[in-house]
Image: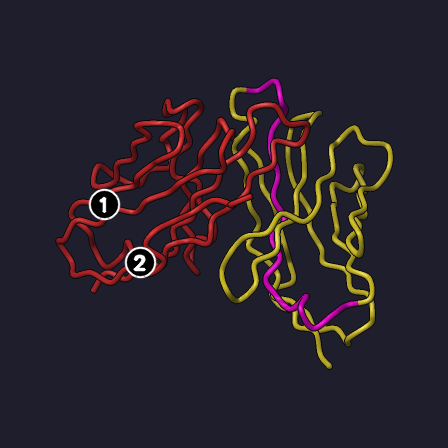
């Protein structure tokens, strides 16, 4: 079975440009999460969805960040305009709706560099 | 608020030996879950093992076991018979009670970089 798929794996862009990160969760999973990982702040939850509906976006740093989940198999995280401090690895994770552990399965991440 | 503390930024272990990675947590919840994830240099996060706060036995998954001491609020990961492929960053994480509205949110520690020496 395919795991969580993220694209692109690497993104280099210039300050001010729009960046769109994409995620395909594991089929059948009801939950989708977006995380950001930096050396300074570690792993931070940005937002998560349940059945395509955003449940908690309190981790989204500012209005420049937005996330959508138009259907059960696709989500995007958009940064507009991007800034150098947005440079990080962005992970998408998904989890089953009924699970004893509520474990999350992570994608390979997108390494974003904003120049 | 929940907090996870991993006090060992880096650890070294000889191949074939056992190693313990420390994790302490702070929570006011009576029910919670604890996870360990592995992040190799390739970057992906791999789920290793889970321990529920009411589980009577310590969790085990192959060479991984969790030394859960509830009164001390610690959930240390033990890796037996270390292999070179175990070299990676290891993260401890916690979730809130299933009944809470935020049960799906994980709080992560800062991680421990494990290096297995040949």
Which residue is at 71% across, 55% downward? B22
* Mark pair 1, 2: CA separation: 11 Å
Spot occupied by residue A86 in the image (x, y as percentages of width and height): 28, 53
Which residue is at 51% across, 45% downward? A2
Q: Residue furthest top?
A: B99
Spot occupied by residue A8 in the image (x, y as percentages of width and height): 32, 55
Q: Within the magenta stretch, is there residue B89? A: yes
Number of numbered discs overlaid on the protein picture: 2
Residue B43 appears left or right of B93: left
Q: Nearer the viewer, residue A90 or B106?
A: A90
Q: Nearer the viewer, residue B93 or A27?
A: A27
Q: Does the residue at mark 1 contact the one at mark 2 (Cβ under 8 Å)?
A: yes
Q: First in sequence: mark 1 or mark 2?
A: 1
Image colour assigned to chain A: red
Q: Which mark is residue B35?
A: none
The quarter holding residue A46 reads: top left
Spot occupied by residue B116 in the image (x, y as percentages of width and height): 70, 73
Which residue is at 57% across, 20% downward? B100
| Quadrant of the drawing holding the N terminus of chain B | top right
Disc 1 secondary structure class: strand
Which residue is at 27% across, 56% downward? A85
| Quadrant of the drawing holding the C terminus of chain B | bottom right
Residue that carries the numbered disc 2 in the rendered image? A112
Spot occupied by residue A112 in the image (x, y as percentages of width and height): 31, 58
Q: Residues within 10 Å of mark 2 (few under 14, many from 20)?
A: many
Q: Within the magenta stretch, is there residue B56? A: no
Q: Give the chain coloured yellow.
A: B
Chain containing mark 1: A
The magenta-colored residue range is: B82-100
Chain containing mark 2: A
Q: Which mark is residue A79?
A: 1
Q: Residue furthest left?
A: A16
């Amino acid at each position: 079975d395919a795991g969580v798929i993220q694209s692109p794996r690497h993104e280099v862009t210039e300050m001010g440009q729009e960046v769109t990160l994409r995620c395909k969760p594991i089929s059948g999973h009801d939950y989708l999460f977006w995380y950001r990982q930096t050396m300074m702040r570690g792993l931070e939850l940005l937002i998560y969805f349940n059945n395509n509906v955003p449940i908690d976006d309190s981790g989204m740093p500012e209005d420049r960040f937005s996330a959508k989940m138009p259907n059960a198999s696709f989500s995007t995280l958009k940064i507009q305009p991007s800034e150098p401090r947005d440079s990080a690895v962005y992970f998408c994770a998904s989890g089953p709706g009924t699970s004893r552990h509520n474990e999350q399965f992570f994608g390979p991440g997108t390494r974003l560099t904003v120049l | 608020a929940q907090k996870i503390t991993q006090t060992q930024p880096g650890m070294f272990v000889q191949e074939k030996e056992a190693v313990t990675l420390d994790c302490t947590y702070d929570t006011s919840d009576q029910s919670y879950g604890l996870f360990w994830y592995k992040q190799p240099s390739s970057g992906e996060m791999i789920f290793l093992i889970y321990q529920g706060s009411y589980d009577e036995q310590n969790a085990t998954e192959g060479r991984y076991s969790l030394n859960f001491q509830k009164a001390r609020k610690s959930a240390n990961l033990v890796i037996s018979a270390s292999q070179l492929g175990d070299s990676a960053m290891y993260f401890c994480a916690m979730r809130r009670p299933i009944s809470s509205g935020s049960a799906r949110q994980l709080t992560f520690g800062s991680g421990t970089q494990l290096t297995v020496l040949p």
